[in-house]
């Protein structure tokens, strides 16, 4: 244990380039740190640090020794912190970023989460803008699409797919399309992305050499729920994610259109800062939503 203390004193001093700074971190005197490092050098029979009146510098042997020792001590600290966290009860506030449609899949299970972890307070931020999880002060975010930020860790939550739907009375009036080209003669309900202003593309399976059909814009809105409701009320054909239309399909308020011609699928992810440790409150939240969300299979 004496050698472990000397190793810790050396690593902290080498990192800070200062006995005083290392002593402050370790909660001891600078002279005690200096004696620990000197004792380690004597045991190893090699000079690890060059001292002067202003700071300390690593010798070549010290640099090599530091590069080997620091990861080992980091692992030891990680193990100690993980054990400490495991013994703590999850409590405190969690700030979670969600897409605006997130309440559809999250709200039904939050009651059970709160019953299981009553000391965890949830602050939910619904926003379709691309948020910076770290700079925005979020503990975690649920998002779809690519995950390019190397500063984040990610957990796959579950799949979703897009489909075409319309109200039965609309199809009775206008007829049911049999191929993507038939959509050119129908009222189409489009979704516009708030952050880019672009209309969402309808990804459809086309025959070889077939061009994408013109999709008349009978209605354009920047809210996915509103687009689905427009279809429920017979305003046209909507292209939407499965979890927004599932209940309407089951109740007969909507009907699938061109099943099998839609090709767009995706994944929802839980993202959180790639810090060394995950707090107990965040760990139980990630585990809970990983178990409970998206247990259904996307509609084929």
Image: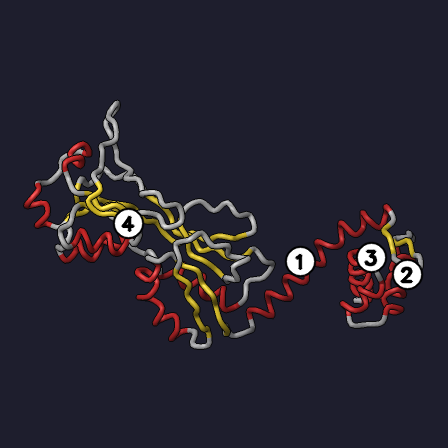
- Residue corresponding to mark 3: 17
* Secondary structure type for disc 1: helix
Could you tell which of marks 1 and 3 lies nearer the N-terminus? 3
Local packing at callout 1 (Cα closer than 10 Å; few below 14, some 14-19, many 20+) is: few
- Residue corresponding to mark 1: 75
Residues at discs 3 and 4 in contact (Cβ within 8 Å): no
Picture quadrant where residue 88 is located:
bottom right
Local packing at callout 4 (Cα closer than 10 Å; few below 14, some 14-19, many 20+) is: many
Could you tell which of marks 4 and 2 lies nearer the N-terminus? 2
Q: CA distance from mark 1 to mark 3?
A: 22 Å
Q: Residue at x 8, y 42 (%)?
A: 174
Could you tell which of marks 3 and 2 lies nearer the N-terminus? 3
* Secondary structure type for disc 4: strand
Q: Which label number is shown at residue 241? A: 4
- Residue corresponding to mark 2: 38
Above or below: residue 120 compared with residue 142? below
For marks 4 and 1, give the one nearer the viewer: 4
Q: Quadrant of the N terminus?
A: bottom right
Could you tell which of marks 3 and 4 lies nearer the N-terminus? 3
Residues at discs 4 and 1 in contact (Cβ within 8 Å): no
């Amino acid at each position: 244990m004496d050698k472990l203390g000397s190793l810790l004193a050396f690593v902290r001093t080498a990192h800070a380039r200062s006995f005083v700074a290392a002593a402050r971190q370790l909660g001891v005197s600078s002279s005690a740190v200096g004696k620990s490092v000197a004792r380690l050098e004597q045991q190893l029979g090699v000079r690890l640090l060059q001292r002067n009146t202003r700071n300390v510098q690593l010798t070549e042997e010290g640099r090599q020794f530091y590069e080997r020792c620091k990861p080992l001590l980091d692992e030891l600290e990680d193990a100690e912190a993980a054990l400490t966290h495991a013994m703590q009860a999850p409590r405190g506030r969690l700030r979670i970023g969600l897409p605006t449609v997130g309440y559809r899949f999250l709200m039904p299970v939050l009651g059970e989460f709160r019953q299981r972890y009553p000391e965890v307070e949830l602050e939910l931020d619904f926003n379709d803008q691309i948020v910076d999880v770290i700079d925005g002060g979020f503990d975690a975010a649920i998002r779809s699409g690519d995950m390019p930020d190397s500063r984040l860790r990610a957990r796959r939550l579950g799949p979703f797919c897009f489909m075409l739907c319309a109200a039965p009375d609309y199809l009775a009036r206008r007829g049911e399309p049999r191929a993507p080209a038939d959509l050119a003669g129908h009222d189409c309900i489009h979704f516009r992305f708030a952050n880019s202003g672009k209309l969402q593309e309808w990804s459809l399976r086309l025959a070889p050499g077939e061009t994408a059909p013109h999709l008349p814009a009978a209605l354009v809105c920047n809210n996915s729920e509103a687009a689905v409701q427009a279809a429920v009320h017979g305003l046209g054909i909507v292209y939407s994610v499965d979890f927004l239309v599932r209940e309407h399909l089951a109740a007969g308020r909507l009907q699938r259109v061109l099943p099998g011609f839609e090709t767009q699928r995706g994944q929802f992810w839980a993202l959180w800062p790639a810090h060394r440790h995950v707090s107990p409150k965040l760990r139980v939240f990630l585990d809970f939503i990983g178990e409970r969300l998206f247990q259904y299979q996307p509609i084929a």
